Amino acid sequence: MGSYANDRSCQHDDRRSLEKTKEPVLPLKLMPLHAANGWLHDMRLSSPTTAPLMNNGSSSGSSDPIYRAWTKKYPSALNAFDQIVAHGKGKKIALFLDYDGTLSPIVDEPDNAVMSDQMREVVRNAALHLPTAIISGRSRDKVFDFVKLTELCYAGSHGMDILGPVGERDSVPEHRSPISSNKKQGKEAKIFQAAPEFLPMIDEVFRLLIDKTDAIDGVKVENNKFCVSVHYRNVVEKEWQLVAQCTNDVLKLYPRLRLTHGRKVLEVRPAIDWNKGKAVEFLLDSLGLGSCRNVLPIYIGDDRTDEDAFKVLRDDKRGLGILVSSVPKESHALYSLMDPSEVMDFLKRLVMSKEEEASRNK
């Protein structure tokens, strides 16, 4: 995968905190949905109103004084670009990207979340220069169908289904099972799946949820292989609690599954210790970068489910998270970007800076 070869020149340098000049952030309470009125509160909390658009189509968040005040706590990754590049100088940057809301805009119909050709070219160029992976709540195959790039890794179902490089380790910890080899991307890669024994159960729950929510106008139930997503983006708010109640009624029959929430979506997934943060750690290990100190992992995402990855990088004090949001919200990320257009600008500048660094070192 282009730049995915294991870096044998890794040196264990001193840890340098990327947040030493920033104020500490109170821990987020990322809890599963709870009973009764808590459902509606959680659904509203994880589904903030999108900032209105100006006549030119850009978000007006940057002109909002509340948003500007929020960016003092989570500075724009574009405004702080020189600082980020300084932290990455002489290091291998590993890039991890969410899909919906990060590489493509959030749309009413999930099947229409298509990334632009311009964004696709920018991501492709980034993957040619930097180890790059997309980690999405979507199924791995769906994300690949949207992105259509063979130069990077794909992790679907919140990192529970990974198509990545062949690492040195023949054995993997619990819930990390190498399933098969795959040459779809033009070179050898392995598929790793977290607890594949859940697949028949997920299929069963998918069918039950379709039947259970059939009478609720606007609901869309999506099978993402290792999780079932119940989208309520097109449901009137007065029926959100009904959506949660129907979902929870089905879930009561499956104690080995749990219910969590993202942006206007409820998600049923295996109750195992696995998330996007675990996927980042696994991919870094597979790339031979897990124990290297001269690597700078960068994760860019917009959703509540990305917080696990932000927290891993923040706690490890060698990587950074960038939250994509046009509205203020608490996060484990260190920096922010407003929307996919700013993500594209950031990726362009990041690749250009690494090209310039490589040129100077020749």
Image: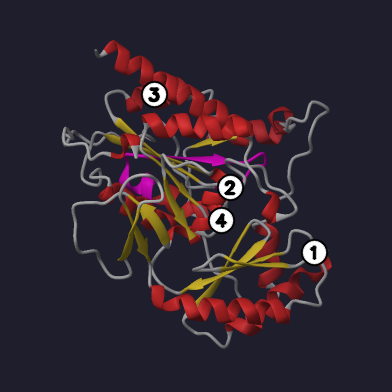
Does the residue at mark 2 contact the one at mark 4 (Cβ under 8 Å)? yes
Q: Earlier in the sequence, mark 2 or mark 3?
A: 3
Name the image quarter holding residue 60.
top right
| In the foreground, 117 or 21 | 117
Which label number is shown at residue 183?
none
Disc 4 marks which residue? 142
Q: Label 1 belongs to which residue?
A: 235
- The answer to whether residue 24 is above or below residue 210 is above
Magenta region: 312-330
Tell me the amino acid under the disc marked 3. Answer: Val
Question: Dot 2: what SS?
Answer: helix
**Residue 168's x, y, as percent?**
18, 52
The Cα–Cα distance between marks 2 and 3, rounded to whole angstroms, is: 30 Å
Q: Is residue 265 above or below residue 268?
A: above
N-terminal of the two: label 1 or label 2? 2
Residue 90 in the image: above or below residue 30: above
